Structure formats: structure tokens, C-alpha cells
Image (cartoon, grey):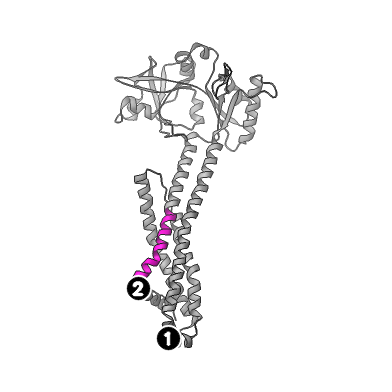
Amino acid sequence: MSWLSTLRVALNALRVNTLRSMLTMLGIVIGVAAVITMIAVGGGAQARVEEQIRSLGSNVMIILPGSSNAAGLRLGVGAAQTLTEDDARAIVLEVEQVAVAAPRLNSSGQLVAGGANWSTQIQGVTPDFFEAREWKLAAGRHFEAPELAGSAKVAIIGQSAARQLFGENTPIEAIVDQQIRVRKVPMTVVGVLERKGQSALGQDQDDVLFVPLSTARNRLVGQTQGRLRRVSTIMIKVHEGADMKAAEDRIRELLRQRHRLQPGQEDDFTLRNLTEMLQAQEASSRILSLLLAAVASVSLLVGGIGIMNIMLVSVTERTREIGLRMAVGARGRDILNQFLIEAVTLSLIGGLLGVGLGVGGSWAIGEFAGWRTQMSVESVVLAVGFAGAVGVFFGYYPARKASRLLPIDALRYE
């Protein structure tokens, strides 16, 4: 008996019991939809973490000042002012793995442009900071050498702060060369940064204004901090392919020497490898995605058990039919193929319906729940392929049982 004839007989058998076939497929439909939806949700979470890593920059570390004691109370990280511009210069000169060491002086204040005002972060930086963060300009230019040396009244603004001052409808190019007041100091906007989005902690990275480090030190912060060349943080970018751990150890050793810390004395700074932290978060989200897919796959197994159950019932109901077919020349292999095709057909049709339900469910979750989802062709192929494998696995035993019936016994069956 040809495969085409066997397929035709199998499809006719399924069409005769349409309602039962649809109910049998329901478990597969739900299982495939659950797998696709869970993979999409997990993929969205993983993509979000990857975006955060890219927004941070690659191979990045940050150095924070240490803690301090006040009236017997031990204050948190960053309370002491222990880092200087000279520390950053020494790091980039003496640690071969370091490509960029960018000092940063953090502050905050009110910005005024025309009739609008906005309170935001104000950060004094050098061009190395934008290189370390891999943060490009959407319009305008970077600070020039004379401006960095002469405490020029120029600024580069993030898009969120720019929109608050100049409105949503103002073209980015039109913001360049606009005049703003920063803590009552008039400044000219020379550049607008590309959008970075939220950080790993949910903070808007674009709500910020950057000025030259010398400008922040001499015009915006207190006299003591400016005179001592103190900085709030130092952003480190390591060369691509360099050993991050070796760089971290060398930087710690260098800073301890520069700060004259004795053996056994605690560091007066904190060194954090931000890339490793986010990569660990990415690995966690990847594991979560696999766990979600594994849990959803249980539904497919339940659907497969349902197929086996219905196929066993079908074998029992059609015992006389099987006997008749064998009596007129059908071989056991033909019977096996027929019932196996029925099981696989149920699984594949259920899988295709599940794909539609899964895609719709993923869209609904993203649209109404606000979760980010990411569909992939691989997840769809995997879910449908797994559904077909379930049909083969759970359909084989009933098909084998049917193929091993003796014609004489099958014809006598009541």
C-alpha cells in the first residue's frame, strides 16, 4: 500500500471523528502556544539586558570613592572624596590593559531655557567619558581642547533633558547653539547625545547635562573640591580582549600605592566591574527563559498523553476494520503507518494552531501587560518540531498495537 493511500485513509479516519480530533489536538495547541509565549517573554527580558550592556559600554569598570566615618557613624560608598583627576591620568598611563580612564564630577541643578526650567544631573567630564560609554552624538560636536582647558561655558545635553527644556516638537538639530542657564551660569549647547534609555536600575540615562570637567570644577562646584581636583567617579574602559581581572587587580594595586594605604588597611575606594554584573544578569535571564520553556513543554507532554489515550481508544473501536483491511491484503506495516500518520497529523495541525495562538498571546502580553516580548523563528520551529516528535512518540505504541493484531481475532472482535 502506497504512502499516499495510507495518508488518505488516515485523514479520512480523522475527518469521521472531527470533534474528537479537535479535542485531542487541544492539548497540543495549548502546549505549543505556551512554549512560544514563554520563550518570547524570556527572549524579551534577555534582549533588555543586552541593551543595558550595550548602553553601558563594553569592558567597563567604575571606581567610586570610599566610605567615611562621621561622629562614630560609618557612611556609605562615595561619602569620602578620595579620587582625583590625577588618579585617572595615572591609571591610563600605568595600566596597559586600560584604554580610557575618564574622571567625572557629579552634581545637580536647575536648567533654564526661555520660559522653561528643569532640574537634572550635571556632570563634568572629558571626551574620554563618551568614548568609555560608547555614547555618540545625535547632533552637534564634542568639547574642544581650548574649551576643556579654559572652563568654557559650553554643554552637551541628553535628549530627555532637552525635551523638557525645548519641547517634544523641536528638531534635535535646532537645539544645538541654543542658550541655557545652568545654576545661573549662561552656557551654549554644542551637542545633543543619542538616546540611551533606562539603566539597569530603571534610571533615565538621557536626563543629564554634560559640561567640561574644568567648567564643573571652577564654575559649578564648591571651592574646596575644585582646588583639590576631586572627582566623583572614574570610568574605566579596558582594551577589547584584555584580561578584565588582571586590569582590576593592577588598578587596585596602583590606587593603594597612590593613596598611601598600608598592608591590611581597607581600600578607600570601590572598584566595580559593571560588565560582569550585567553579564551575570544576562545569564540569569537566559536560564529563566529555559526554565519557562521547560515548564511550558509539560503542556506538550500532557497533550501527547491525550493523543496516546485517544489513539488507544480508536484502535479498540476499529478492531474489526483493522481485521478487514488485513484480510484483504493490508500488511502490519500499513496499519502501523496509518495510525502513526493519524497521531502525527493531530500533533502537527495542533502545533500550527498553537503557533497562531502563541504569536497572538505574545502580542497581547506586550500590548496590554507592557512586557517586552521577542519572537524568533527558531522558537516557532522548535515548538512545532517538538509537537511532531510528541505525536511520533506517543502515537507509536497504539500504532504498533494495532499492527500486531491477528486478522482472525480482529474479525471476531465485538
Q: Position of residue 202 (x, y in %)?
A: 44, 34
Q: Is residue 404 above or below residue 274?
A: below
Give the main secondary structure of the magenta stretch. Answer: helix
Amino acid type for the residue under numbered disc 1: Leu
**Residue count near mark 2 (Cα–Cα under 10 Å), binned few <14, some 14–19, many ≥20:** few
- Residue at the spot 54% in from the left edge and 17% down from the top edge: 230
Q: Position of residue 379 (x, y in %)?
A: 45, 55
Residue indicated by mark 2? 15
Q: Position of residue 243 (x, y in %)?
A: 62, 36
- Residue at the spot 46% in from the left edge and 62% down from the top edge: 302
For this view, does 82 lie left or right of residue 122? right
Q: Is residue 29 magenta?
A: yes
Q: Is residue 305 visible?
A: yes
Q: Quadrant of the N terminus?
A: bottom left
Amino acid type for the residue under numbered disc 2: Arg
Q: Is residue 385 visible?
A: no
Residue indicated by mark 1? 324
Q: Quadrant of the C terminus?
A: bottom left
The magenta stretch is: 17-36
Q: Is residue 355 above or below residue 261?
A: below
Q: Nearer the viewer, residue 335 or 26?
A: 26
Q: Is residue 15 above or below residue 353?
A: below
Quadrant in the picture for residue 319: bottom left
